[in-house]
Image (cartoon, grey):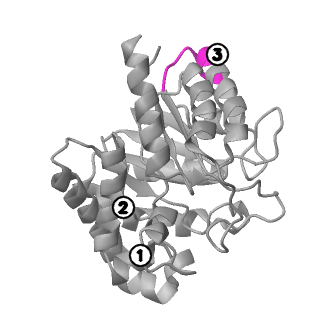
Amino acid sequence: MTKLTLLDGGMGRELKRVGAPFSQPLWSAQALIEAPHYVTQAHTRFIDAGADIITVNSYACVPFHLGDTLYQQRGAELAEAAAVLAKQAVKSTSKDIPIAGSLPPALGSYRPDLFEADRAFDILTTLFTAQNAHVDLWIAETISSINEALTVSRVFEKTNKPCYYAFTLNDEISRPSALRSGELVTHAIEAILEKKIDGIFFNCSIPEVIEQALIETNKVLEKHQISFTTGAFANSFTPISSVNQAANLNIQSSRDLTPEEYIAYVKKWHHLGASIIGGCCGIGPEHIEAMAQWRNKLGEN
């Protein structure tokens, strides 16, 4: 069976849980501005839980959360500070943990209707430049449309570091699997196969929809006789309908997804070949720790 690498969990809600200042619309950027030590603390909690990769807390360093004025004034500075804090967290644990730079949705999570390619490219380039000296790999998170993925691919042309695309899925369980834009997962993967790409993930979606997306991904890769890393990091939201998509704008309704319940999904993803698995919003260190314990038992067999 494929070796399992553990990604960290959702930073936003972990920051809130450890007591960091946390309000809308700043979201996880508020701690960067007002109390950065909480960011280091949250990273450390995930590392101690068993995460093999941590992700820079730059998700909210965009105009959608900061507002245009604060983004122009401090967006790049805050993204770089987030990357430095991740390095400090790794150093404090004395573990050799690679750091993933984050390219978030530039113009709003789950909002393909707001996407403008040229504007997004400028924002993502700014965040890329701010983080690049401090990270080991890249994850473009919560990609909602093919147009967004193609714009990300233009940014990824700037690096030789590993680059991963993480698509967010329509929460309405269906076959075939679709992105938030309604475009098919298979079409999205076909669109980026010849781009700079090292892996395909699915994130910030309910865990129930990821299995089908991985099945369809495997079929596309088999069809083209190519191999990429696949992975997943789901959220603990209740399903969000396609007509009410506004992640991280309002506090989403969450469910109490226990580590044991989450691992039941993780096992299915890993069986389908997913080799990098973590968590998104609402998936905390306790989930990562349970995953690490399960993985360790796999190694005993």
Residue at numbered disc 3? 223
**Residue at the spot 22% in from the left edge and 57% down from the top edge:** 87
- Residue 194, relative to residue 65: is it above or below? above
**Residue at the spot 75% in from the left edge and 39% down from the top edge:** 184
For the magenta stretch, what is the residue range?
A: 220-228
Of callouts 2 and 1, which one flags the residue occurring earlier in the amino acid sequence?
A: 1
Please tell me whether mark 2 or mark 3 is closer to you in this view: 2
The image shows residue 116 at horizontal and vertical percentages of 62, 66
Residue at numbered disc 2? 42
Please tell me whether mark 3 or mark 1 is closer to you in this view: 1
Circle 2 SS class: helix
Residue at numbered disc 1? 20
Circle 1 SS class: loop
The image shows residue 134 at horizontal and vertical percentages of 23, 56
Let me know if residue 230 is in the magenta part: no
Q: Residues within 10 Å of mark 2 (few under 14, many from 20)?
A: many
